Amino acid sequence: LCRTSKSSYREIQEHHRYISLFLESLCRQDHFEQGHLVLKLKECSVDREIIAPQLARYHNRLQARGIEIERPADMIDEEIPLRVDVGLLSQVYANFISNAAKYTQQVRGADGRLRKALAYGREIIPDYFGLDEDGIKFNVFTTGPHIPQEERDALFQEGYQGKDSNNRGGSGHGLNFIKQVVEIHGGKVGYEPTLEGNNFYFILPLPDASYSF
């Protein structure tokens, strides 16, 4: 096969893998039998097995909008394996990144330079879930104006669509789905306005096993 054909074949394979993963995680028989999302846990590297494939999937869309992806050095070769549902958590990141492709805007930073970016990362929060029960916070940041104060409490409610959602597509179910997936993992979701933009995050319990920084 020529180089172009090989590249196209790999893209088809990757697309099939994404679709298969998403269908399996959404159409799992246990979901319907028990009437709620049911986890299929697997130990994995969140950066390599969940985030990186979704960034690759949305790469062209982000590039077309001139959005730079800022990768964190502390998540390369992830050293904190977590037991999560890879399919469901992949859809969490798919929703975050899809929203980033729609809503990220250019800003002028404190240094005077223009910036239009999607950034992600993680941080350990000691005792977040109780004494000696640490949490690991995963952040997805995008540049742009802050979400209005009056809208923030409704962000993760079913059917929520902000005033800035006109003509951008979407059903208003994505953030509520993220909330359900994170909470069934024993975690919490949230939003915070930060310098130069908006940060959506979720916090999961950190395994008891030792970890390194």
Image (tube, rainbow, N blue to C red):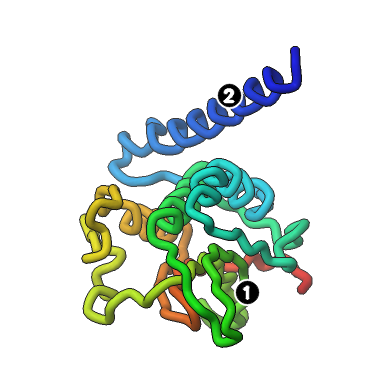
Label 1 residue SS: strand
- Image quarter hosting the N terminus: top right
Under mark 1, the amino acid is Glu
Under mark 2, the amino acid is Ile
Instruction: Give the crowd class for mark 2: few <14, some 14-19, many >=20 residues within 10 Å.
Output: few
- Residue 183: give x, y in percent of width and height: 41, 61
Q: Which residue is mark 1?
A: 123
Residue 138, by quadrant, is bottom right
Query: Residue placed at 61% from the left, 67% from the top?
Result: 121
Q: Residue furthest bottom?
A: 110
The numbered disc on residue 12 is: 2
Q: Is residue 112 above or below residue 22?
A: below
Total marks in image: 2
Which of disc 1 and disc 2 is earlier in sequence?
2
Query: Residue placed at 31% from the left, 57% from the top?
Result: 176
Q: Nearer the viewer, residue 200 or 210?
A: 200
Q: Nearer the viewer, residue 25 or 152?
A: 152
Q: Is residue 178 left or right of residue 58?
A: left
Q: Is residue 118 left or right of residue 34?
A: right
Instruction: Give the crowd class for mark 1: few <14, some 14-19, many >=20 residues within 10 Å.
Output: some
* Dot in front, 2 or 1: 2
Query: Residue placed at 76% from the left, 61% from the top?
Result: 79
Q: Is residue 97 above or below residue 19?
A: below
